[in-house]
């Protein structure tokens, strides 16, 4: 049976969240704050609800709207190199490298942005990336919106199953190992044959008993 390993990124493969640092990289912190203030209703709603995801969505609009897709992809390449050099968790990369050495298929399944996960995946030599995409118009300018659903929670599993259908004949034909670190990964971990909960400190990687 084909062995497939799926890795969440933020806090699992990396030491912390990467989306916010990338937004700051793209816009610059003062500029990002200034652009956010141009969206008072979104910002106020996110703050009132204490909704971190809503604040991220407003920040994505502020950082990317009207920016050239090619320029942002170039920034994504640079950011991926820094993530690879500075933000990876060595103990999780060991697991990833072991899967690759065993000939397993390895895929990143993440709510992080495909813009920098694609080049990061090339640096890590993994097979594919299922991540959140940014929408662009016909002129190649980013709209500030997400292209399709955010790849988190149940959407991670849906996207992974579609990928398995395309590349491996379906979920039933593979042994799936998954790595995650947060409640947002619970659907991915629940779907796996072997699930690993990644701890926040040290090298804690615990296999979840089914």
Image: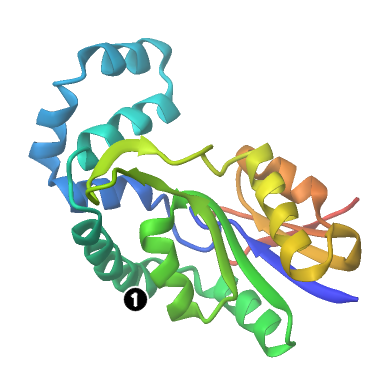
- Whether residue 11 is visible, yes or no, is no
Q: Write the residue at 22% across / 48% down.
A: 139
Quick check: 23 left or right of 202? left
Q: Is residue 163 above or below residue 54?
A: below
Q: Judging from the image, what secondary structure is the residue with disc 1 in?
A: helix
Q: Residue sitting at 34 percent across and 68 percent down?
A: 80
**Front residue of this view, candidates 47 and 130:** 130
Figure label count: 1
Of residues 208 and 59, the one drawn nearer to the viewer in this rendering: 59
Say few, some or many: other residues with alpha carbon within 10 Å of mark 1 (under 14 / 14 to 19 / 20 or more): few
Q: Which quarter of the picture shows residue 143?
A: top left
- Does residue 53 show up? yes
The one nearer the camera, 4 or 196, is 4
Q: Position of residue 199 (x, y in %)?
A: 61, 54
Residue position marked by numbered label 1 in the rendering:
85
- Asked if residue 27 lies left or right of residue 164, the reply is left
Q: Quadrant of residue 162?
A: bottom right
Q: Is residue 82 above or below residue 47?
A: below
């Amino acid at each position: 049976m084909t062995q497939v390993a799926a890795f969440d990124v933020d806090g699992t493969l990396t030491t912390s969240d990467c989306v916010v640092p990338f937004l700051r990289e793209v816009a610059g912190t003062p500029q990002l704050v200034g652009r956010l203030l141009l969206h008072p209703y979104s910002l106020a709603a996110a703050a009132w609800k204490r909704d971190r995801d809503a604040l991220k969505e407003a920040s994505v609009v502020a950082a990317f709207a009207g920016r050239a897709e090619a320029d942002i992809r170039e920034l994504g390449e640079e950011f991926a190199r820094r993530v690879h050099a500075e933000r990876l968790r060595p103990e999780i990369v060991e697991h990833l490298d072991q899967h690759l050495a065993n000939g397993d298929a390895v895929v990143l399944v993440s709510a992080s942005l495909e813009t920098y996960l694609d080049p990061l995946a090339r640096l890590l030599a993994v097979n594919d990336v299922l991540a959140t995409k940014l929408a662009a118009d016909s002129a190649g300018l980013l709209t500030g919106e997400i292209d399709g659903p955010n790849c988190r929670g149940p959407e991670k599993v849906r996207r992974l199953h579609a990928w398995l259908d395309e590349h491996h004949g379906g979920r039933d034909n593979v042994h799936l190992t998954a790595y995650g670190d947060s409640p947002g990964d619970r659907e991915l971990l629940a779907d796996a044959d072997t699930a690993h909960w990644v701890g926040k400190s040290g090298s804690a990687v615990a296999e979840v008993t089914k």
